[in-house]
Image (cartoon, grey):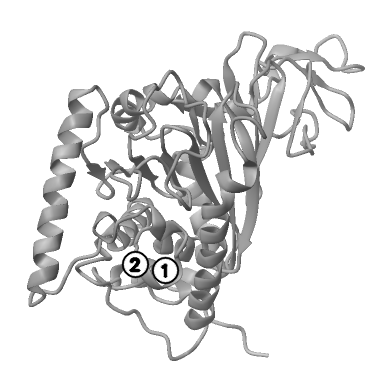
Amino acid sequence: MLSRAPLDIPRLIAERRRGYTLAAPFYRAREIFDLDLEVIFGRHWIFAGVEAELPEPGDYTRLDIGHLSIVIVRGDDGAVRAFHNVCRHRGARLVTQEAGCVGKLVCPYHQWTYELTGELIHASHMGEDFDPSCHGLKPVHLRSIGGLIFVCMAAEAPADIDDLAAVLEPRLAPFDLRNAKVAKQVDLVEEGNWKLTMENNRECYHCAGNHPELGQSFNKYAVGFVPDADDLAGQAEAAAYEAQVAAQVADWEARGFPSVAVEHLSGRATGFRTERIMLDGSGESQTLDTKAACRKLLGGLSDAKLGGLHLWTQPNSWHHFMGDHAVTFCAIPLDPEHTLVRTRWLVHKDAVEGVDYDLDRLTEVWNATNAQDAALVELAQQGVRSPAYEPGPYSPLTEGLVDQFATWYVERLRAHLG
């Protein structure tokens, strides 16, 4: 059997055409997937979870990305830290469960024991010359921004995370996510490359025909629909909607709720976009009837009609924050053609299921939407396997943000490869 020639990745990067989808190897090739793990997920800030998952000292979660594994734990001092999930003795995994609560971090192999701050405090039979202070757990950069946890596994993390924090902290403060709780977490494996998952998320060109549940709370003009130039009625309708949005945003801003769009999706290491969007119907929440799903509002809010604060971060997350609940999404690459999408629904920590909220009602819109998106991503992955596939043009009217994602991705690979 003839061996396949190695991919010329620099050539593929150089040939990427702005405004077009990526070449097929970017969605299929093991060499590029491995490069993605090293460069994109190994050297950039990754959304990893929420502080609400770790309400008590000793609570931990484990996050695996390729061969990398980290443990995120709340210490006795209340601080949240992250460490490589690797014992400093012979490299065994420290924690094997996805989540739990511990007093110390104890390696199951030889019982080396670490404080929740990472210091090695017990290693038997190591001799008099052994210095425990030289064998603490290796830390991972962690930033909690408004209760959202971001980690970076590089030795030196991109400093522009400070820009994200400066924009987000005042926007997330009213929701007090650090004092919320996770009402539900759902993991869904999409049969597609992680970049197809993210591209699908970055546009709503597909929404009208595929997301009837989500469409109850999203006006088409709020999610990128642009009427044709000769559609005079549509143009007038869009203009009226924009005027309504401007008035609503001015009102939110005057009441102390930052809302205007801030967009830095490419041209930087830590790309992001955030904006408060008006919701249709009652305007309270992303539910089938557009009314609040939880009677006890987040933080100290007294008004459920605050639209939906929307957030995207490169490379792997999107979020919706409403007065009554929040939904966070995390995409984790599993292999070149499979991606884990982890969805968490957050409510006020004192909200009681069955009293303040019904779990099915809280989750039904995004459970349906996620399943629909997974089917679309699978169709796209099937298509890029075909020898007939070639990069196609993004819609300049409705897919500009998809192009920005692809541009950011290529920029980061190019910066790494020089």
**Marks 2 and 1 close (CB-CB < 8 Å):** yes
Q: Residue at x 47, y 33 (%)?
A: 324
Left or right position of 101 against 167 = right
- Quarter of the rendering containing residue 219: bottom left
Q: Mark 2, residues whose alpha carbon is within 10 Å: few (<14), some, or many (≥20)?
A: some
Name the residue carrying label 1. Answer: 9
Name the residue carrying label 2. Answer: 13
Q: Residue at x 56, y 40 (%)?
A: 345
Q: Amino acid at mark 1?
A: Ile
Relative depth, front residue between 309 and 265: 309
The answer to whether any part of residue 332 appears in the image is no
Vertical relation: 114 (above or below) 51: above
Residue 6 placement (x, y as % from top left)? 51, 75
Q: Residue at x 31, y 23 (%)?
A: 170
Q: Mark 1, residues whose alpha carbon is within 10 Å: few (<14), some, or many (≥20)?
A: some
Disc 2 is placed on an element classified as helix
Q: Amino acid at mark 2?
A: Ile
- Quarter of the rendering containing residue 124: top right
Relative depth, front residue between 165 and 220: 220
Relative depth, front residue between 368 and 78: 368
Q: CA distance from mark 2 to mark 1?
A: 6 Å
Left or right position of 385 against 279 = right
Vertical relation: 74 (above or below) 277: above
Vertical relation: 349 (above or below) 249: above
User: In the rendered image, which quarter contains the N terminus?
Assistant: bottom right
**In the drawing, what numbered circle is on residue 83?**
none
Left or right position of 416 against 46 = left
